Image (cartoon, grey):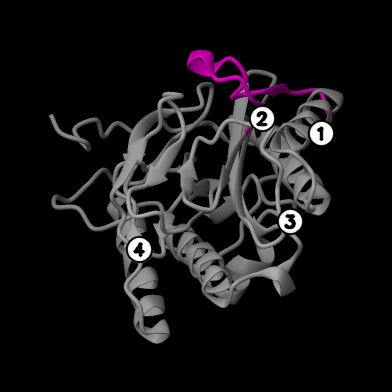
Amino acid sequence: MGLFGRERIEAKTHEQVLLMRAAGLLVGQTLRLVSEAVRPGLTTKELDALAETHIRDGGGVPSFLGYHGFTGTLCTSVNDEVVHGIPGSRTLIEGDLLSIDCGAIVQGWHGDAAISVIVGGREAARPEDLELIDDTEASMWAGIAALAVGKSLYAVGEAVEDSITASGQRRGREYGIVEDYVGHGIGTSMHMDPQVPNYRVSGKGPLVVDATTVAIEPMVTLGDEANRVLEDDWTVVTNDGSRAAHWENTVAATARGLWVLTEVDGGEARLRELGATYAPLT
């Protein structure tokens, strides 16, 4: 069937979306807490313990912990690690590019989101790393803004690719868009149909229906997008050693507009900047 052979979109009720907001908000709050704690000298395992405590204290369960044997609450991917880095004894140093992926379950419903930060703050970053982080985040928001009831789901990937291409041209470089790992449907399971590409694909694609919930998550590299999985069977690294950034949000699209379930403000500020309709359910 190929990568995008499974195209069924499972619509939620508005009441179910409200339940997903509880999980998404806990994820967003956890990522905010962890990002504020990041500093040189911490290990990725210490950040992971902070996240697990916050999720459990908030009435949730970590989505990742135990998932197919994964041993962390977070995925902590450093520098050339694209995604699925396992928290452990690695000590963070100033200037590291750290991508943090987090998932939580509340009352059976999932939230899933990721951010990328510089250890030591933006002033400690290489300029190209800051540009990579900012441009990857911008591409995620472009993809979110393209999600709309009645439109093809593939509009998301088109918008992500167009955003990254335009950013690369402005910077005078060619970014790599990782194609082996894509976004996904989400609800009572963390990974559900449909898959959500971060680039153009052929075909019309499934139509977005009222109360569609998906995770949109571009992963972008400073070099070639070719990658491999390390011997731990989880950590994905770039083949050429170039650094990577990863951003993700869980988003609900209804006939009224968009609600970013894993953003603390529901995505209101960024959606309004982009001219997209912010439409939380009440």
The residue under label 3 is 265
Q: Magenta residues, as a range? A: 58-74
Numbered circle sitting on residue 88? 2
Task: State the separation of the CA atoms marked 4 and 2.
Answer: 26 Å
- Judged from the image, the secondary structure of the residue bearing numbered disc 4 is loop
On the rendered structure, is 38 left or right of 142?
A: right
Q: Earlier in the sequence, mark 3 or mark 4?
A: 4
Do the residues under discs 4 and 2 have CB atoms within 8 angstroms? Answer: no
Say how many tags the image has: 4
Q: Which one is nearer the viewer's eye here, 273 or 231? A: 231
- The residues bearing labels 3 and 1 have C-alpha atoms spaced at a distance of 22 Å
Q: CA distance from mark 3 to mark 4?
A: 33 Å
| In the image: residue 161, left or right of residue 78 | left
Out of 254 and 137, give the one closest to the viewer.
Answer: 137
Residue annotated with mark 4 = 223
Query: Which element type, helix, strand or loop, lies under badge 2?
Result: loop
Tell me the kind of residue under disc 3: Asp
Q: Secondary structure at mark 3?
A: loop
Specify the amino acid type for callout 2.
Answer: Gly
The crowding category of the residue bearing disc 2, from other C-alpha atoms within 10 Å (few below 14, some 14 to 19, many at least 20), is some
In the picture, the disc for residue 140 is none
Looking at the image, tell me whether mark 1 or mark 4 is earlier in sequence order.
1
Contact (CB < 8 A) between labels 2 and 3?
no
Looking at the rendered structure, which numbered label has been put on residue 50? 1
Q: Callout 4, which amino acid?
A: Gly
The answer to whether one can see residue 152 in this image is: no
Decide: is 278 above or below 45.
below
Q: Earlier in the sequence, mark 2 or mark 1?
A: 1
In front of the other: label 2 or label 3? 2
Q: Amino acid at mark 1?
A: Leu
Q: Is residue 217 magenta?
A: no
> Residue 168 appears in which quarter of the rendering?
bottom left
